[in-house]
Amino acid sequence: MARLTILEHKEIARNMMWLAFEAPEDLIYTPGQFLHIRVTDGVDHLLRRPISLCKVLGEKTGIGIAYRVGGKGTKLLQAKKVGDVLDVLGPLGKGFKLHETDRHALLIGGGIGVPPMVELADQLTQNGVKVTSIIGFQSQNVAILVDELSAYGEVLVATNDGSLGKQGFVTDYMTDELLASADRFYACGPTPMLRAVQQKMEGKVDGYLSLEERMGCGIGACMACVTSCVMADGTIGYKKVCKEGPVFSAAEVVF
């Protein structure tokens, strides 16, 4: 746990915020991990908010996150100013696994599932992996981090209303030709999107899904965020998203 000073806080799209704060000492992280942030020092909203790590800033001096303002908790976070101090746990959970032999990876994000793809894209390209990002939003006015991902490779955008990129869903870009060129995929977003991606990729491309779940403790103690998975013996059981995830092999997740 650390108390970290806010360095930057601004709106980047409708109800979407970018927040950067100083990094914990001796920061050790994996793309896909999350931070558990307390939004108030008072007795209200004691439960922390899990928010994916988006980008580690130069020389590990800071951490950037992007989040959607929705309920009262995120509205309290939105009210924080530069210079305020955040109570932060993390990075927590299991992140994305990088494979040394991969040459081309598909990064698939939907809505607030897009932010963790930025740090992942950075590390993959540093390892010599070609990155194609496929990201989806409801509309242009809630689209985020398109330019940031463009710095690492081709970005294909889908919106529900066609106001940016192709009208439709991220799966509309997943042609047989594109999938045949990919060694791995990494996906994060709402459950319907992840289910569709899993079905599209089955038997074609191996990959990982980062699940979004409500969390209590964030460290595997409260059992509030369990999800159905195929266990090592082939039976269906439960795993904790906060500790055994949020990233899972696509083949083990049972929707």
Image (cartoon, rainbow, N blue to C red):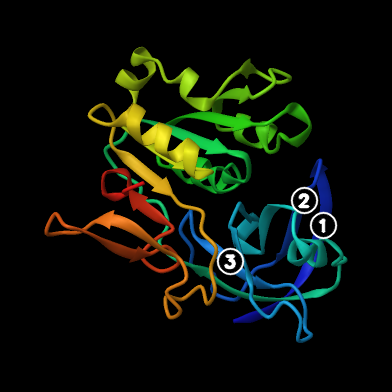
Three-letter amino acid code at disc 1?
Answer: His
| 26 displayed left or right of 237 | right
Q: Residues within 10 Å of mark 3 (few under 14, many from 20)?
A: many
Q: Nearer the viewer, residue 134 or 231?
A: 231
Three-letter amino acid code at disc 3?
Answer: Leu
Mark 3 vs 2, N-terminal side: 2
User: Which residue lies at the image location 82% right of the left edge and 61% below the top edge?
Assistant: 78
User: Element type at marker 2?
Assistant: strand
User: Element type at marker 3?
Assistant: strand
Which residue is disc 2 drawn over? 17
Can the viewer see residue 62 in this picture?
yes
Mark 1 near mark 2, Cβ–Cβ under 8 Å? Answer: yes
Give the residue at the far left of this rendering.
233
Which residue is disc 1 drawn over? 9
User: Which residue lies at the image location 68% right of the left edge and 31% below the top edge?
Assistant: 138
Which residue is disc 3 drawn over? 35
User: Element type at marker 1?
Assistant: strand
Q: Residues within 10 Å of mark 1 (few under 14, many from 20)?
A: many
